Amino acid sequence: MKILIIEDDELKHQHLDRFVSLLLPNALLTWKKSYQSGLQELMANPYDLILLDMSMDIYEKTAQETGGSFETYAGRMLLNEMDMNEIQTKVIVVTGFDVYGDGKTLETLKKELRDDFGDFYLDTVYFIASEDKWKTEITQLIKKNFPDYFMSQPITMVLSILLVEDSEYKIEKVRNFINQVAPKSKILVAKDQIAAQKYLLQEKFDLMLLDMQLPNRFGEGELDADGGENILRELEINDNYKQPDKIVALTEFENLKEKFNHNFDNFSSIKFDTMSDKWKESISKHLNNIQRAKTSKIITIYCENQNDFLYNAIGLPNVTFIGIKDSRAVFLTVKNEKDKFGLRDKDLLTLFEVGRLKEQFKNYLILDYYCFENYLYHPDNLAELQLANFNKEDYVQQITKQKNEKLHKILYDLKETRKGYAEMNDTDFKNQDRNPELIVENLMSNDFDIFYPFFDMKGENKSKGFDRTCLNEYNLDKKELVKTKWFEERISKVLSKILNHQKIVCW
């Protein structure tokens, strides 16, 4: 599916791009920033869908171009061009205005667009970055107008599947198919009733594919025609078992399928037949449904600046990061919107303040180190890369040396720096530590583990932060630095509270 986003606001484009990429992982997205560049792209290349801003510059802004005039109804102008050129690409208008400068309301504009461009205009969605309603509306419009494509999306999320089956042949067939359509799935196999019950006591699964004929213990005794039903009965009466989100019977025998449907009308069943692909289509449909259900439970975490790209590169399942302006914006988000999560750098907050903030705002996450870069350039993180000529001890000494050389400037600016934190100026927050002597003591220490959480490794202000010139020879790529085991474990530890609360398993 090819989607053209015509939007002049970079932050709004980022929101749209991230959301659509999650909703339709296989879609090809193109971004144009003005009426003219959007129209040229549309005339030159076919698209399935356009996400169109209503108010934008006529031309794209560059170092040489101002962007021309700003046109309130540039989106409507583009729709007119499409109509005249008989371009029938579906369009969703995404606007940040509910009332325009001439007094026209959003509802009035919707009616006009519907009347004039009803053949290809789908609807107008009101965009507010901090709310999720626009996401729901776009999702519903895409589902309604592109049902075949939406159903054919590959499974890209981590799915946990328990396959209860004693036949090696069926195990191989089913597992190979799932690995094709859902390559990120974790598949566990239980060949008998006892093994299945043990797994169900230990772990919650997204899907259990259950054979009806199973031995009590694999390799011992005959097959039990009621083996699958026995497992389901145990799930009904014993609360210690972790109920799978979806249970589907998978059997070769029509009589067992009918018996299952009669006894368990709240579960689905599939006839396994090597002469037909219907069983594959049925399993694929169930996997897609599970993925969409899990997508609606994706955790969104707002973080500082442009770090979202690197946080997302870690690949934590069911978690997406969105970068906003700074730590103040993150704090105000979690303070005013209890359903949103925020992650900020620790900076020079004391441990007392961090604890109080987390206690007061359950949706607030704070790094254990001064900033994001303290994780990227931590000696243990670099050591894991096995860089040629890298000596961890020498690197620690270099960080310690720079810290001591800049200590006077750091301590001199300490009080003023802390005054700039939004939490310190918030009238509702009464728990700031007025005498942060411990920060001073930590920074004065030459014990790496004590001072490092308070030393700025970002390096933007080299008079107070780390100068990374000594690392230039290694040509470090941030995208590689966030993919180490050490980095993922440390960030997962920071996020463990919400990951555990949401019952998300990181593999």
Image: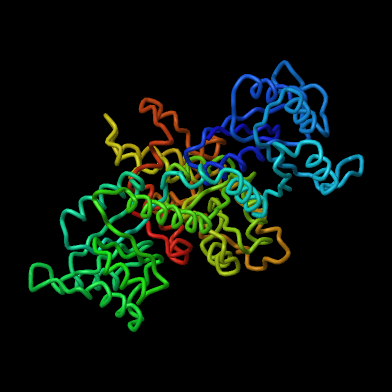
- Residue 353 vertical placement versus 483 (above, below): below
Residue 7's spot in the image, x, y percent?
Answer: 69, 33
Q: Which residue lies furthest to the left in this view?
A: 220
Residue 171's spot in the image, x, y percent?
Answer: 21, 55
Specify whether 207 is left or right of 421.
left
- Residue 441 vertical placement versus 245 (above, below): above
Q: Can residue 407 be seen in this view?
A: no
Q: In which quarter of the image is residue 471?
A: top left
Q: Residue furthest right?
A: 102
Q: In which quarter of the image is residue 332?
A: bottom right
- Residue 322 vertical placement versus 222 (above, below): above
Work out whether residue 105 or residue 353 is closer to the camera in this orientation and state it. Answer: 105
Tell me which residue sits at (76%, 33%) in the image: 75
Work out whether residue 178 or residue 340 is closer to the camera in this orientation and state it. Answer: 178
Residue 145's spot in the image, x, y percent?
Answer: 61, 44
Q: Residue furthest bottom?
A: 237
Specify whether 177 is left or right of 467.
left
Q: Is residue 64 visible?
A: yes
Specify whether 195 is left or right of 10.
left
Work out whether residue 246 or residue 62 is closer to the camera in this orientation and state it. Answer: 246
